[in-house]
Image (cartoon, helix red, strand yellow):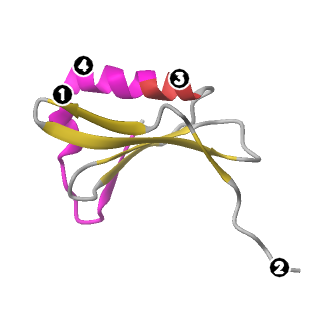
Amino acid sequence: MTETDPTIIPSPLSKTVSRDGIAVEVRIFKLEEDDGWTLEVLNQTGTSTVWEDPFDTDAAAFAAFQRTVEAEGMETFLDDDAEGWTTIH
């Protein structure tokens, strides 16, 4: 039996967001068999910030992104680490 990759369902709320001269790609998605939505923010250098806990809705995930920008600014997504990704929870 051949295993297939799970189907990824992207949210229509996924988009590029620009503010204060910084652009990031907001990716919101879930696996077809899962209930929770994942929030990932990719900066211009390819560093990915991923929230550990899933969200009940894609709107809740996007709201978490907006709250982070309001509290910490877009600069929070510019932090590069040696691994190429960071996690927020």
Residue bearing mark 4: 70
Mark 2 or mark 1: whose residue is earlier in sequence: 2
Left or right relative to 53: residue 22: left
Query: Mark 1 — residue?
Result: 73
The CA span between labels 2 and 4 is: 46 Å
Looking at the image, the residue that sits furthest to the bottom is 1
Residue 2 vertical placement versus 88 (above, below):
below
Asked if disc 3 and disc 4 are in contact, CB closer than 8 Å, the reply is no
Q: In percent of the image, x 18 and y 48: which residue is there?
A: 79
Name which residue type carries label 3. Answer: Ala
Q: Residue at x 20, y 37 (%)?
A: 76
Q: CA separation, marks 1 and 3?
A: 20 Å
Q: Secondary structure at mark 1?
A: loop
Question: In the visual, does 52 lie left or right of 72?
Answer: right
Q: What distance separates the C-alpha of mark 1 from that of mark 4? A: 6 Å
Q: Which residues are magenta?
A: 63-88
Rendered image quadrant of residue 41: top left
Question: Which disc is residue 59 wearing?
Answer: 3
> Residue 64: image x %, image y %?
41, 25
Pick the residue in front: 10 or 43. Answer: 10
Tell me if mark 2 has few (under 14), some (14-19) or many (20+) residues whose alpha carbon lies within 10 angstroms of its own.
few
